[in-house]
Image (spheres, helix red, strand yellow):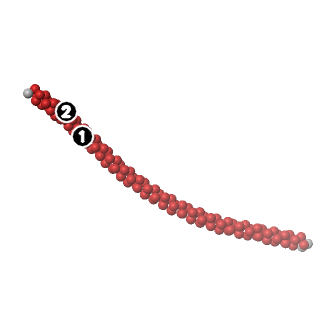
Amino acid sequence: FAAEMTEIEIALRSVREQLSSLDDAQTERGALEEQLTHTQGELATAARMRFQLAEELQHERATAAAQAETLRADMSELQMRHAQQGAELERLTSLLEQERRSRVHAAALHAKEMGALREACLATP
């Protein structure tokens, strides 16, 4: 009978150890499941953040492209204005040169006429 009791005690101790191990395993499993849930939440948050960042970058890219297009248009307009002003400057320079030549010619004619008058006045007694 004592031998049977010892076997039963050993079996009981073994069952208690197994139950303790099972309890430890379930506790560990719960902790792992909690950690997995937490990690999945972090991954979902990271995915949302990446998506938002991608949207922001796309918006910034579109804005930058629009600004670049505006700058190109402004640059074209400035180049066109520069060319027009250059042509106008050439036209005005040409007119100014014609005016200068005309005045030089008029001054030469005036000087010639004055010289002729002076000679005529000196020639008549």
* 35 horizontally vs 99: left or right: left
* 3 horizontally vs 44: left or right: left
* Count of numbered tags: 2
Q: Quadrant of residue 109?
A: bottom right
* 47 horizontally vs 91: left or right: left
Q: Quadrant of the C terminus?
A: bottom right
Mark 2 Cα within 10 Å, few/some/many (few <14, many 20+)? few
Measured along the vertical axis of the image, is residue 22 above or below residue 5? below
* 113 horizontally vs 54: left or right: right
Q: Which residue is mark 1?
A: 29
Q: Which residue is mark 2?
A: 17
Mark 1 Cα within 10 Å, few/some/many (few <14, many 20+)? few
Foreground residue among 101 and 59: 59
What is the x, y in percent for residue 123? 90, 72
Which residue is found at the position 19% from the left and 33% from the top? Answer: 17
Q: Earlier in the sequence, mark 1 or mark 2?
A: 2
Measured along the vertical axis of the image, is residue 75 above or below residue 113? above
What is the x, y in percent for residue 31? 25, 39
Which residue type carries mark 1?
A: Arg
Q: Secondary structure at mark 1?
A: helix
Foreground residue among 114 and 1: 1
Q: Secondary structure at mark 2?
A: helix
| Alpha carbon distance from label 1 to label 2 | 18 Å
